[in-house]
Image (cartoon, grey):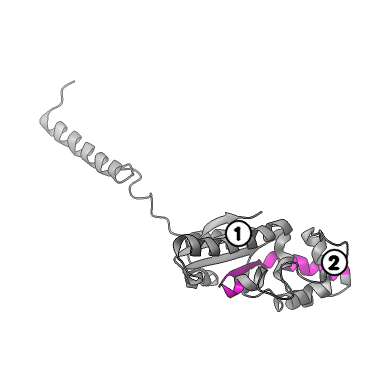
């Protein structure tokens, strides 16, 4: 095979482009498409970017045991950030999400006092210390700074699945003979401190990652 000078120059030029593309982590054919994706931004998600902090974590929970773990993980995150890195509470942005069967725990003691049985039924929650119907959110202590109250004071935000809340309202309405829409409004007005609704828990978990939050799954 004979390669003339013109062909040789074109071959070397092509190899140079390929080498440059490889150095940039791309092939010539993909150089114009790889790394160009950027997720769309929506006003509903702006709050994710407004939380102060040098580090961001989104802790996801889907069960009664999961929210218990999620609150513990959040507490440990604050404590270890302080002891291991000298960071203050405001230096970390922490979001705990309640979706699926952990959603009933997003509401305060007043809601549990009124709707304890259907809420516990949806959450598949059983009090390990009593067979009585729960009349208070197990994670909202009557006094002290533990659970939701203490974490909210540190700046933790609690993302609540709106789809699951509507489902919960329907379950409560069936159990009590009430109207689902009215019960939904009642629930929405009685969230835990720093509670905010997201369209769905799965949306909150994925959007948060687009905003630089690390996903931590608590179950």
Q: What x and y, as percent, mark residue 186?
A: 75, 78
Q: What x and y, as percent, mark residue 36?
A: 38, 55
- Among all residues in the image, which is located at the extreme left? 5
- At mark 2, the secondary structure is helix
Name the residue that disc number 2 marks.
117
Name the residue that disc number 1 marks.
73
Q: Quadrant of residue 148?
A: bottom right
First in residue order: circle 2 vs circle 1: 1
- At mark 1, the secondary structure is helix
Magenta highlight on residue 153 = yes
Whether residue 132 sits left or right of residue 165 in the image: it is right
Give, as a single range, the part of the protein colored magenta. 152-175
Q: Is residue 99 above or below residue 180?
A: above
Whether residue 87 sits left or right of residue 1 in the image: it is right
Residue at image coords 69%, 65%: 163
**Of residues 33 and 173, the one drawn nearer to the viewer in this rendering:** 173
| Quadrant including the C terminus | bottom right
**Of residues 113 and 72, the one drawn nearer to the viewer in this rendering:** 72
Q: Is residue 22 above or below residue 40?
A: above
Q: How many marks?
A: 2
């Amino acid at each position: 095979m004979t390669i003339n000078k013109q062909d040789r120059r074109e071959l070397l030029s092509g190899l140079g482009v390929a080498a440059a593309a490889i150095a940039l982590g791309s092939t010539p054919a993909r150089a114009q498409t790889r790394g160009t994706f950027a997720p769309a931004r929506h006003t509903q998600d702006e709050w994710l970017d407004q939380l102060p902090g040098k580090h961001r974590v989104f802790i996801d929970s889907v069960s009664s045991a999961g929210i218990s773990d999620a609150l513990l993980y959040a507490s440990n995150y604050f404590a270890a950030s302080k002891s291991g890195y000298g960071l203050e509470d405001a230096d970390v942005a922490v979001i705990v999400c309640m979706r699926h069967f952990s959603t009933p725990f997003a509401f305060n003691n007043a809601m549990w006092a009124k709707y304890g049985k259907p809420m516990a039924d949806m959450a598949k929650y059983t009090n390990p210390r009593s067979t009585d119907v729960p009349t208070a959110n197990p994670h909202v202590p009557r006094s002290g700074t533990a659970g939701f109250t203490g974490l909210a004071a540190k700046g933790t935000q609690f993302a609540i699945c709106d789809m699951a809340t509507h489902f919960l309202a329907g379950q409560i309405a069936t159990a009590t003979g009430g109207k689902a829409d009215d019960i939904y409004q009642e629930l929405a007005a009685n969230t835990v401190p720093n509670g905010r609704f997201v369209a769905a828990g799965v949306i909150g978990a994925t959007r948060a990652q687009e905003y630089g939050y690390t996903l931590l799954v608590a179950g």
